[in-house]
Amino acid sequence: MNAESASIQGSAMKLGYTIIYVPSVPSSLRFYEQAFGLVKRFLHESGDYGELSTGETTLAFASHALGEANFPTGHVKASESNLPLGMEIALVTENVDTAHQSALLHGAIELSAPAQKPWGQVVSYLRAPDGTLIELCTSV
């Protein structure tokens, strides 16, 4: 281990937020508010960036326009992909069935209905209207 690695490992690294690039930040915020009862924490006046309160880690959204400014060579747009991206957000809830049905009512697409896993956890998978892959699950 070099000195730089040792210095990083000794610091208090933590996940601060996840940012999802979407076609419409206000629409994505509205979906999560309506489908799951999450609370909007912030929406920039430009509409290009917004955040939801989700506990210790913030779930944030940025416009594809902002993504294009940040990544001049481009980025994969979940909203334009036929397949879900190889990453997901997981929302933990005591009632996966209810949350799953609410998401469907607000425009999500079902990928996998709620099912109990061999280890006892109930899990379902959806795609949000903006293309984001969402896992709804009970605590492990």
Image (tube, rainbow, N blue to C red):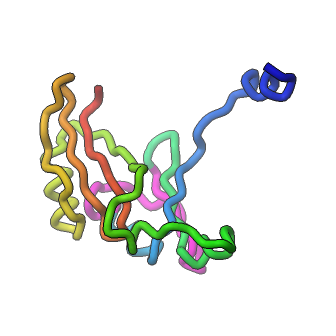
Where on the picture, by quarter, is residue 37? bottom left
- Residue shown at the point (62%, 35%) measured from the top left: 14
- Residue shown at the point (69%, 28%) measured from the top left: 12
Total marks in image: 0
Residue 52 drawn at (x, y percent): 46, 57
Q: Quadrant of the C terminus?
A: top left
Residue 4 drawn at (x, y percent): 84, 28
**Left or right: 15 with respect to 133?**
right
Residue 86 drawn at (x, y percent): 41, 51
- Residue shown at the point (50%, 67%) measured from the top left: 76
Foreground pick, 2 / 99: 2
User: Can you say whether 55 is above or below 24 in the image?
Assistant: above
Q: Is residue 126 magenta?
A: no
Magenta residue span? 32-53
Q: Is residue 48 magenta?
A: yes
User: Can you say whether 7 is above or below 122 in the image?
Assistant: above
Residue 91 drawn at (x, y percent): 33, 45
**Left or right: 87 with respect to 115?**
right
Q: Quadrant of the N terminus?
A: top right
**Left or right: 4 with respect to 104?**
right
Where on the picture, by quarter, is residue 132? bottom left
- Residue shown at the point (21%, 22%) measured from the top left: 119
